[in-house]
Amino acid sequence: MMSRKFLPVLLVLTGAGLFLAFQTKGKSDNDNPKSRYSKVLRNVGLMLEQGHYSPKKIDDGFSRLVLKKFTELLDDDKNIFIQSDIEGFRKYENKIDDEIHGAELESFFSINDVYLKRLQETSVLYTDILSKPMEFSKDENVLLDPEKLNFSRSEAERKDTWRKRLKYLVLSKYVDLQAEREKNKGKKDYVTKADSTLERESRDAIRKQIERYFKTKITHDNADENFTIFVNTITGCMDPHTNYMPPIEKRSFDEQMSGTFFGIGAQLKEDDGRIKIANLISGGPAWKSGELKVEDEIIKIAQGNAEPVDVTGYAVTDAVKLIRGAEKGSEVKLTVKRMDGSIKVITLKRDEIKLDDTFAKSAIINGDHKIGYIYLPEFYVNFDNPEGAKCSDDVAKELQKLKAENVEGVIIDLRGNGGGSLPEVVKMAGLFIEDGPICIVKGRGEDKPFQWKDKDKSIAYSGPLTVMVDEFSASASEIFAAAIQDYKRGIIVGSTSTYGKGTVQRSIPLNPESENAYFAGKKPEDLGSIKLTLQKFYRINGGATQLKGVTPDVILPDGFEYLKFREKDNPFALPWDEIGKVDYKPWTSTISNDLVIRNINNNLKMNERFNKMQADLALLNKLNDKEYSLSIQKFKEERKQLQATNRDLDTLSRLSKNLVVKNIAADTLSINSAKEKLDKNTQWIRRLSNDIYIDETVKVLDNMINQSTTVKNN
């Protein structure tokens, strides 16, 4: 729901955008990066100040914040810049805000020039460091946590920083090779190598790895990419979810939301610095042509008859951007090198590719009771195609199939689900309740928040329900889990809390004149768009999902608990607050969720497996949050402790007896239609069968079903 108060703001932004476009037209060429970057920066500033839900003042204090964060994002390991560079950048401390407001853009170009110069310098350091044998008896440490590091005070200190980092990598590889030698000692035909040989092979392996790293980094870290980082530093200082998207990134975002894109149906991989074909999607253009083969190396990519781009040193993600297109039927030409060394140019026409892994899918778990399981990786919708996939429709279909199989309970798995469409989550929640509000959204300065309601009284499924979440469950996932919890419709199972993203964004073009087909008689320049935070989510009980997320009813320990990546760990996150609750009618049932939750949590307190997992995870967090020794003896001792703890966790994370998981009969034909689908399904079923968290969630449902049965019998 777009706030009505925001509509005048959009008009102001449109007018400002047009004014800026006219103001710059004739003064500079649109192909000039400085002109384009200035327009992007100014329009982003207007959006932030006049449209953001809770804007910070763009002043000298904001400018200092942006400068510090930008240099740290460019050099996130603090091993490229030196301290004198950082001090030299201070002349821009109070200027970036002026540049956002229309002053000549200087800071980015100056910082970027220094960065690219330092990157070139740094990219050759490894050759000298790795050319000499390394000695691992010296008692020295390496610190890898950038938050605890300072920029090097000199070029010599920077080189020593790289020496220690490379020594750590070589030592790790060297110890692995020694362990492999020990394991294979005495085996027939195994050639035992001396330590000196293993040390040399370790340096050679790391040299190749670092060579590939810098080749890709130098190709990728161009002015456009770094300017995107610069603008996203500015938007990120407002809040973590306001982002600038250049045109190609916007296309990728839309593809992710819809679960479809226009491409050739080939999956790529990086192999020793080269981009190769990893797999062909059945039915896709590449598969149909019969010309492109697995293991073919892609050398160049061209758009139709345009000049081909040499992708040597490209990251896989950058090559994918070139291959995918915005239009069905558009041509892409790949220059590929076969395994026999021959070179061939292959012309393919893009077609719609569906990402099946993005869509809802289900299975049946047989045990004490027959349980239906639905996995939903995101709340997807195709905004451009009314007939495209919608998660609410797909989940409804999966529920119908599960009901036809006479399941006694249902699990909705939202682990790793980062969110998606707000209307879709409202519709999906409505599948499990009669009708009523699902969430509340509040815009900037609004006195009366808007209620998103399910108005459909029909219920797709009324039986026992559990929802699985984790730290990666965010946004729409949190709305769904919160609604199910507030209505007492089901039980939420997961880690200590969900992610905590309780804000609403809308994608807005940065050149508003592009809304017209042509501007001033020519096609307007595409400046990209901004995904702008406009509103906040609130639960129907009045509390925000922002920052705090949703606390599950049943909490299980997991391996990511100690990583600092939730919303609450970001210093720029918007705060938690609450508003008045709305009227809603909780679900009435013969099952007491509170009683089930109490029973399960009491059992978990005495669960030796989870208690031991909790202790091991705490130990791993402690072992990983430190300096690492470059003495081989201490290194081996530390690794031994880490490996023992990881082995223990691995054992604890495996079920002693696998769950009995099978596909729904109605899905058999589709699964067996292609070998690729069959293989993926086999892996998926195997993974579900040995998932301790699904096993624990099944126990929650068993408890609910047993209680319901007892009530009926009485």
Image (tube, helix red, strand yellow):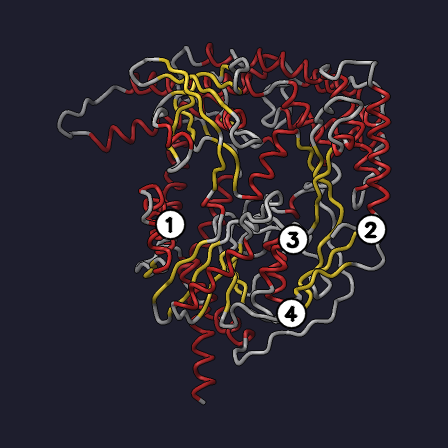
| Mark 1, residue position | 684
Relative horizontal placement of residue 188, taking residue 633 as reference (left or right): left
Looking at marks 1 and 4 on the same chain, the residue that comes earlier in the sequence is marked by: 4
Say if 28 sits above or below 446 in the image: above
Looking at marks 4 and 3 on the same chain, the residue that comes earlier in the sequence is marked by: 3
Looking at marks 3 and 1 on the same chain, the residue that comes earlier in the sequence is marked by: 3
| Mark 3, residue position | 422
Amino acid type for the residue under numbered disc 4? Asp
Q: Residue at x 82, y 46 (%)?
A: 6
Disc 4 and disc 2: Cα gap in Å? 25 Å
Q: Nearer the viewer, mark 3 or mark 1?
A: 3
Relative horizontal placement of residue 528, taking residue 398 as reference (left or right): right
Label 2, secondary structure: give it.
Answer: loop
* Residue 176 image offset from top left, x and y in percent: 33, 29
Amino acid type for the residue under numbered disc 3? Leu
**Labels 1 & 4 near each other (Cβ < 8 A):** no
**Labels 4 & 2 near each other (Cβ < 8 A):** no
Neighbour class for label 1 at 10 Å: few (<14), some, many (≥20)?
Answer: few
Amino acid type for the residue under numbered disc 1? Trp
* Residue 225 image offset from top left, x and y in percent: 63, 23
Q: Nearer the viewer, mark 1 or mark 4?
A: 4
Label 4, secondary structure: give it.
Answer: loop
Question: Which residue occupies the foreground of this view, 270 or 121?
Answer: 270
**Labels 1 & 2 near each other (Cβ < 8 A):** no
Which residue is situated farthest in the bottom direction here?
Answer: 714
Disc 1 and disc 4: Cα gap in Å? 34 Å
Q: Residue at x 84, y 37 (%)?
A: 57
Looking at marks 1 and 2 on the same chain, the residue that comes earlier in the sequence is marked by: 2
- Say the numbered circle drawn on residue 435: 4
Looking at marks 2 and 3 on the same chain, the residue that comes earlier in the sequence is marked by: 2
Image quarter of the C terminus: bottom left
- Say the numbered circle drawn on residue 4: 2
